[in-house]
Amino acid sequence: MNKKLKIIIIFFVCLLVIEFAFWLFLFFHLPQEVSSYEAFNQVLVDNQRRVVVGSRNTQEDNLEKGILALYEASGELVWEKPYDSGETSTFYAVQKDSSGYVIVGSATFTDEQKEKDLCEGILVQYDFDGNKLWEKRYQVLSDTRFYDLMITNTGILVVGQSIYENLEVGNHSIGGGIIVQFDFEGNVLWNSNYGGNKSGSFNAVTSLGANYVVVGKDSKDTGITVVFDSTGKMIWEKDYSYTDDSGFMDVVTQGDDIYVVGSKKIVANNDKIRDTENTDALLVHYRKDGTLVQATTFGGSSHERYQSLYLKGDKLYAVGHFTSLNIDLTPAVENKMTGLLVEMDLEGNVLNKASYGGNNNDNIVFLTMEKDHFLAVGYSESNDGSFASESYSENECHGFFVTFDDALLNFGL
């Protein structure tokens, strides 16, 4: 090979190396495109305004952060406060006390926790202007999350989950679904628990006379309802099989009656029930002593779930989502989640039903009252203008409000 040819070959090899180094620099140094995400998990109506909790990431850092936001009843944002501690975080529930707004959720505080998605439960007190007054972190096993709370005479009652991380073994006796009574300054007064240390969870809590009723799940597909007294002593517990992987999601009470919602696995051959992906929205009715009155389902050949429940007079109103094509409701988009609204009598008979959705996945997760109408929140990937919040692409998720009347009509924001 002559000298001139060698020089030409070396020249082109150098060009290739320089070009490779250039593209390598761009990959590691230029901002990477990420999806923006927002979810509204719960809303509290306070003085004709909406106090919302949830989470959001941004296209700048792609880190999910818990958010507390105040909106006018028109849907106009007044202020928003992202959680300013930890690495990543989510707010799940909010209540009002004399000092302001009390929030529960979960957060990661180290790189290892963030990498493994192992959280600590967080309890945060804000004033009425969204200024953080104090916060408490709580952890039993490797992964701890707070999902719901209520204000009691002695302080703040919180429920959630504390479980082992994947592949971790042990026989810890205080994990699974957890219930913790804090005083109004965030000091622990007592705690209790029930359920498996690998999957147990308490998802919601409400009062039952002087006691507390908590719902969630034990094993992968067993819903649980547990009643505790005011000192954390368990009075009774009832299992229900087979639910979906989330178990029971919400609970309301009236007198001697307890109503619980979630999603139930449905299959013709019970030998295969734990493997099915077909689930129906589920309402379970118990007496206050734990006696099962009845369980009713609503659904078709795919997936339905009641996520939140509201009792108004002699009617039950549930919200969630559905995907089935054979339930006399038409999904907004086939094979996508559409928001579900259902009116039932106290026996669980469906009196009315409606769908609410856009051109992608939509899920309604919480229901309450605002003046003389219902107010619900959730999250959506739709971008066709059906929702209060703005979406930037079909793949991005945003929180939304929706209002409706007792007849499940007159949708608004």
Image: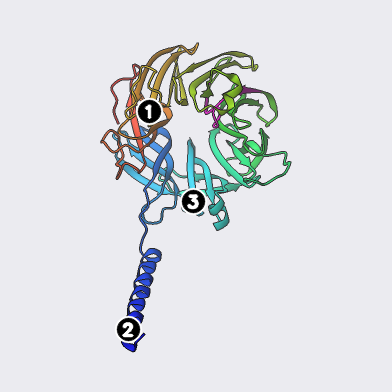
In the rendered structure, find residue 339 and report the number of the disc placed on it. Answer: 1
In the rendered structure, find residue 299 and report the number of the disc placed on it. Answer: none
Are circles 2 and 1 on residues that touch, CB within 8 Å?
no
Q: Check disc 3 and report its element: helix, strand or loop.
A: strand
In the rendered structure, find residue 88 and report the number of the disc placed on it. Answer: 3
Which residue does the image show at 45% across and 19% down from the upper left?
A: 299
In which quadrant is the C terminus drawn?
A: top left
Q: Is residue 100 visible?
A: no
The three-letter code of the residue at mark 1 reads Gly
Quarter location, residue 383: top left
Reading the chain from its start, which is encountered first: label 3 or label 2?
2
Highlighted magenta segment, given as a residue range: 238-253
Q: CA distance from mark 3 to mark 2?
A: 57 Å
Reading the chain from its start, which is encountered first: label 2 or label 1?
2
Which residue does the image show at 50% across and 54% down from the upper left?
A: 87
Q: Say above or below: 183 vs 350.
A: below
Which residue does the image show at 56% across and 28% down from the upper left?
A: 275
Task: Give the number of marks.
Answer: 3
Front in this rendered view, residue 407 or 321? 321
Quarter location, residue 44: top left
Q: Is residue 195 left or right of residue 74?
A: right
Q: Say above or below: 55 vs 360.
A: below
At which x and y percent is residue 152? Answer: 57, 32
At which x and y percent is residue 84? Answer: 46, 53
The three-letter code of the residue at mark 2 reads Leu
Q: Residue furthest bottom?
A: 3
Q: Is residue 161 visible?
A: yes
Q: Which residue is label 2 attached to?
A: 5
Q: Is residue 352 left or right of residue 245?
A: left
Looking at the image, is mark 3 or mark 2 nearer the viewer?
2
Q: Is residue 176 left or right of residue 47?
A: right
Reading the chain from its start, which is encountered first: label 1 or label 3?
3
